[in-house]
Image (tube, rainbow, N blue to C red):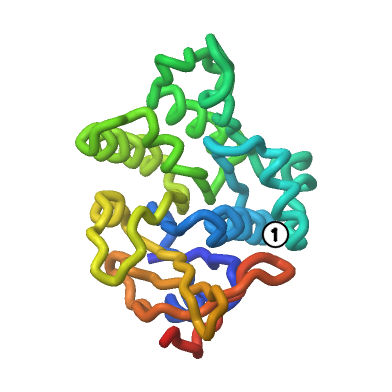
Amino acid sequence: MEYVSTGVSGLDALLRNKGFPAGFNIVVMGSPGSGKTTLGLQFLYHGCLKGENGVYVTLDERPASVFRNVSNLGIDLEPFVKEGRLAIVDASPIRTIPGEIKLGGISIGKKDFSLAALIAAVGNHVKNIGAKRLVIDSLTSFFIQYPRVAERRAAFLELLEGITPLRCTTLLLTELRYSGADRPYQFEEYLADGVIILRKYLKNGTVASSIQIEKMRGVDHDVEPHPYKFVIGGLEVYPTEKVI
């Protein structure tokens, strides 16, 4: 099995210093503001630095807004976009613009948004630049189109079936709908190859954050939650510290 570095300081240590298994589809779950997008873009940024091209799919915000926010942490993605090493699939207009829109050269309607069109657009960008890394941000917006759980599960399976043949190491960002220790599992957790959970919690009267690798199929990994924080460069994980 081959591995790719996460690009997140301290996170590789939780994966026995190997990183993510290449080609895995990994769900990153967390509450708003927990750092899901930062982790995803940090992963792509690190890949570009190592010569591993990437594709970023945004279903929430405009790319300019996302890039501006992470630039405050020292993650400058614009040069990689200009060099053709990082491709952007901006699917955010699906939520805001009526009528037909263009997505990766494919015309689709707002009300008739086709999952196949999204998969095709992602596939085109991956092949055009030879991408090895892929981030989809976020599944929460993607699932809005499917009101029933059975429909969301089927759509997620179809998405996985569409992107897996691309052989990218993929991070699929999504909302952590329940945060308690006895929370019910979300269906994404069963279907993905790996699951990473970002949580916020109160400690000594202040809000702290923890990261936990809940699942990584066939890979030895640390399953305990560990603290992390935002620093210049993105997220920094403290693998030797535990959350009490």
Q: How many marks?
A: 1
In the image, residue 61 lies at what x, y percent?
61, 38
* Quarter occupied by the C terminus: bottom left
Residue at x-position 27% and y-position 53%: 186
Report the side of 167 relative to 214 (left or right): right
**What residue is disc 1 on?**
49
Q: Is residue 221 above or below residue 234?
A: below
Q: Is residue 13 above or below residue 151?
A: below
Residue at x-position 30% and y-position 50%: 188
In the image, residue 169 lies at what x, y percent?
46, 53
* Quarter occupied by the N terminus: bottom left
Q: Is residue 202 above or below residue 138?
A: below
For numbered disc 1, what is the local secondary structure? helix
In the image, residue 93 lies at what x, y percent?
58, 25
Residue situated furthest front in the rendering: 205
Residue at x-position 34% and y-position 78%: 223
Q: Is residue 109 above or below residue 75?
A: above
* Circle 1: residue type: Leu
Report the side of 88 relative to 27 (left or right): right
Identify the image quadrant of residue 219: bottom left
Residue at x-position 44% and y-position 22%: 117
